[in-house]
Image: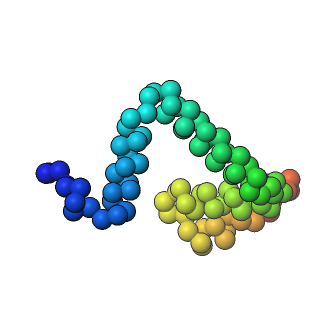
Amino acid sequence: MPKKRNCRRNEQEKQVHEQAVALRKLTDQQLIDRIEQKYTAGYEAGKREAKPIDETPRHLTEQLLLALSLDVKGIGPALIAKMRPVIQGIVDGRGSNE
């Protein structure tokens, strides 16, 4: 694929190209510092915006059923409706025969 001439690039393409060239010119240590800085900033932002996880048994039951429905082929709404009372009974400590 031939190289695209600079005169045929639009302004956005020129800006992206300049940023890419600037990144390629960084030393290894500069790249590592930049990545660590972005990672830390993103982690802190996510930590501030994170919502507390509800650890109630009902919430855990719903999470389990959702995971099963997404990961296991053949588990759909009908089977989940049958499984919900059984799993809820186990989580609540009533046993699996109710």
For the image, the number of numbered tags is: 0
Viewer-closest of 22 and 38: 22
Residue 13 rendering spot, x and y as whole percentages: 33, 59
Question: Residue 87: in sight, yes or no?
Answer: no
Q: Residue furthest left?
A: 2
Q: Is residue 66 left or right of residue 50?
A: left
User: In the rendering, at what x and y percent does residue 35 appear?
Assistant: 54, 38
Q: Residue at x 60, y 73 (%)?
A: 78
> Left or right: where does residue 20 sit relative to residue 34?
left
Q: Residue at horizontal 73%, vertical 49%?
A: 47
The one of 4 and 45 positioned closer to us in this rendering:
4
Residue found at the very far front of the displayed protein: 7
Choose between 91 and 60: the one closer to the eye.
60
Q: Residue at x 37, y 37 (%)?
A: 24
Quarter where residue 9 is shown:
bottom left
Q: Is residue 20 above or below residue 67?
A: above
- Residue that sits furthest to the right in the current view: 93
Q: Is 28 placed above or below 12 here? A: above
Give the color scheme: rainbow, by chain, secondary structure or one colour: rainbow
- Judged left or right of residue 6, residue 18 is right
Residue 4 image offset from top left, x and y in percent: 19, 55
Using the image as rendered, state which of residue 65 and residue 41 is in the foreground: 41
75 relative to 44, above or below = below
The quadrant of the image that shows the C terminus is: bottom right
- Name the spot of residue 71 as percent of width and height, x first: 53, 56
Q: Is residue 72 visible?
A: yes
Q: Residue at x 59, y 43 (%)?
A: 38
